[in-house]
Image (cartoon, grey):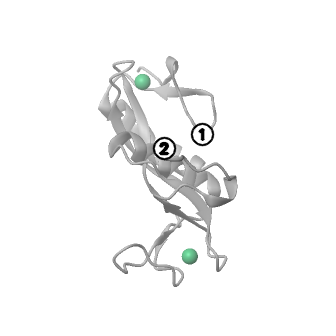
């Protein structure tokens, strides 16, 4: 039985280490529950166009809650809270690839974990300035 191998091409952006690759969607799927427990995430196989193999990507988070706090997104919907910065980062990375959406983790102002926002964080200072 084939096992996972470390990719020579694809890096996990959140850890900077090579991603695990699986030879088939089935192999990735069978590894997803175990890997998910280890990383605190809900994982699904995804075919990678870079290396042609399969990776596990974060599609959800163990412990992520909708409406854990009073924070709301645009349109008034309750924001999803992520239990840790790591999980929020992984989700942001996944969504940036799957939805071409740039998201930024930030700590919930009321202390209920982490949220993602489309607005770049202000406290990092440099805001892209429109060219005159
Ligand atoms: Zn890959
Ligand atoms: Zn909040």
Location of residue 67 with respect to 85 vertically, above or below: below
Instruction: Write down the residue under mark 2.
Output: 93
Of the four image quadrants, the one with ligand 2 is bottom right
Specify the farthest residue to the bottom.
70
Near mark 2 (Cα within 10 A), the count class, few <14, some 14-19 or many ≥20, is: many
* Closer to the camera in the image, 125 or 106: 125
Location of residue 76 with respect to 31 vertically, above or below: below
* Closer to the camera in the image, 54 or 15: 15
Location of residue 19 with respect to 124 vertically, above or below: above
Tell me if residue 54 can be seen: yes
Near mark 1 (Cα within 10 A), the count class, few <14, some 14-19 or many ≥20, is: few
Spot occupied by residue 23 in the image (x, y as percentages of width and height):
36, 22
Picture quadrant of residue 118:
bottom left
Picture quadrant of residue 21:
top left
Please report the residue visible at 33 percent of the width from the left and 46 percent of the height from the top.
99
Q: Are marks 1 and 2 in contact (CB under 8 Å)?
A: yes
Q: Is mark 1 within 8 Å of ligand 1?
A: no
Please report the residue visible at 32 percent of the width from the left and 23 percent of the height from the top.
49
- Which of the marked residues, 1 or 2, is nearer the chain's N terminus? 1
Tell me if residue 40 can be seen: no
Check residue 23 in the rendering and tell me which mark sits there, or answer none: none
Please report the residue visible at 42 percent of the width from the left and 73 percent of the height from the top.
73
| Label 1 residue SS | loop
Q: Give the Cα separation between the discs numbered 1 and 2.
A: 8 Å
Please report the residue visible at 45 percent of the width from the left and 73 percent of the height from the top.
79
Instruction: Write down the residue under mark 1.
Output: 14
Spot occupied by residue 22 in the image (x, y as percentages of width and height):
41, 26
| Label 2 residue SS | helix
């Amino acid at each position: 039985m084939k096992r996972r191998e470390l990719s020579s091409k694809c890096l996990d952006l959140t850890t900077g280490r090579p991603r695990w690759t699986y030879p088939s969607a089935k192999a990735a799927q069978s590894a997803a529950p175990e890997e998910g427990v280890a990383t605190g995430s809900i994982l699904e196989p995804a075919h990678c166009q870079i290396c042609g193999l399969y990776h596990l990507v974060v599609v959800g988070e163990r412990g992520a809650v909708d409406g854990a706090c009073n924070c709301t997104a645009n349109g008034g919907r309750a924001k999803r809270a992520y239990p840790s910065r790591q999980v929020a980062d992984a989700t942001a990375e996944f969504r940036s690839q799957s939805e071409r959406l740039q998201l930024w983790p930030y700590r919930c102002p009321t202390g209920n974990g982490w949220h993602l926002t489309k607005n770049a964080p202000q406290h990092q200072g440099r805001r892209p300035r429109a060219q005159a």
